[in-house]
Amino acid sequence: MDFTAFKHSIFNLQSPFEFNETALSLFRYQYRNNDIYKRFVDALGVSESQVYHPEYIPFLPVGFFKTHKVITGDFPEEVIFESSGTTGIDTSKHYVVDTDLYEQSFTHGLQLFYGDLSQYAVFALLPSYLERQNSSLVYMVEKILQKSNRQMGGFYLNELGALQEQLQEAKTRGLKIILIGVTFALLDMAESFPVNLPDAIIIETGGMKGRRKELTRVELHGQLCKSFGVEKIHSEYGMTELLSQAWSAGDGIFRCPPWMKVMIADINDPLSFLESGRTGGINIIDLANFHSCSFIATQDLGRVFEDGSFEVLGRFDNSDIRGCSLLAP
């Protein structure tokens, strides 16, 4: 499979048909060149010839990234992204062969949703991620900052007062503002250092990381809207094991870029998919995950709507049902 041509083509898909054909070609390539994925598909009793539509592609449980090196082909990795873990041991590792592909994916995706990044002053409040190494989120935001309006912006750890002052100054200057932050840190700021930014884009990346009591999305977004003076809170849906993200402009409804798709599986039968509106396990096709696995079964519950947008409703722990026990570590 010609990686250079593929890399160009996925960001220029013109139709659902092209997406499906690309996904099927990628399935065949990864089945033949990714030992872990091949063993998983074979263990399910699925043959390559049976897969003639994306609905028949087996999705690798995300838990495999904690126990196996999930990589397609024999290439040296440029970076290893690692998920956060409460124990420091139970973490996922994503071996990324081509960081340029990751950068193209999140850059093209953000520009589709928000336009030219150079028009924004970007502020990042990501304390739990800055406190550790190998975070894909920090890597992404670092590159976004490089493409942004460099007059103001940057990373903030625990300097909430200084961030409040800088945001107020950016507002006074008439700059377009993006504030992206981990949920618990945004709440800390909302409670102790509120700032009225009615025209800003506030993006929460999810996760309390054990720092605060979990809130419903309605409660969380209500508090943040009040403290930042905005009508909607935006959100990012991504994970260490992927190279693409979905984005929400409010109300918890996410939309994927054209090279990413969410499908909802029956949690008791991971090879069966549900129609729109029904709740099940979120499965993701990420065409940018060329050198890893593009077909991931997450541990998130959700539902997809007729237009392809989706909602995340929570998490579940049915890894054995979903197939992690089919292969020994």
Image (spheres, rainbow, N blue to C red):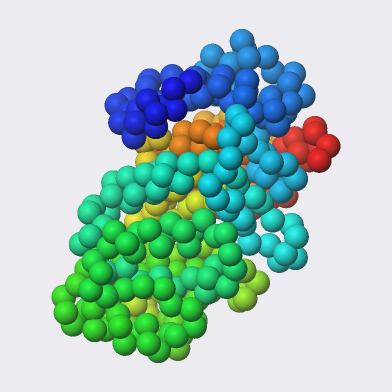
Is residue 136 in sight in this rendering? yes
Residue 109, image x and y in percent? 35, 46
Question: Residue 283 in the image: x percent, y percent?
Answer: 57, 38
- Name the image quarter holding residue 95: top right
Q: Nearer the viewer, residue 91 or 271?
A: 91
46 left or right of 56? right
Vertical placement of 321 versus 149: above or below? above
Q: Where is residue 50? Give x, y as percent.
A: 62, 12
Residue found at the very far left of the displayed protein:
174
Q: How many marks?
A: 0
> From this viewpoint, which residue is outermost toward the top?
49
Seen at 49% across and 71% down, the residue is 126
Q: What percent of the width, then of the height, locates residue 256?
A: 40, 42
Picture residue at 61% right of the left edge, 10% below the top: 49
Q: Is residue 205 above or below residue 8?
A: below
State the residue lying farthest toward the right: 328
Task: Report whether residue 223 is seen.
Answer: no
Q: Nearer the viewer, residue 109 or 292?
A: 292
User: Would you place residue 128 above or below residue 59 in this image?
Assistant: below
- Nearer-the-camera pick, 96 or 173: 96
Residue drawn at (80%, 32%) of the image: 326
Give the residue displayed 39% in from the left and 54% down from the top: 248
* Vertical side of 4 occupied by 127: above or below: below
For the C terminus, the image quarter is top right
95 relative to 220 in the view: left or right = right
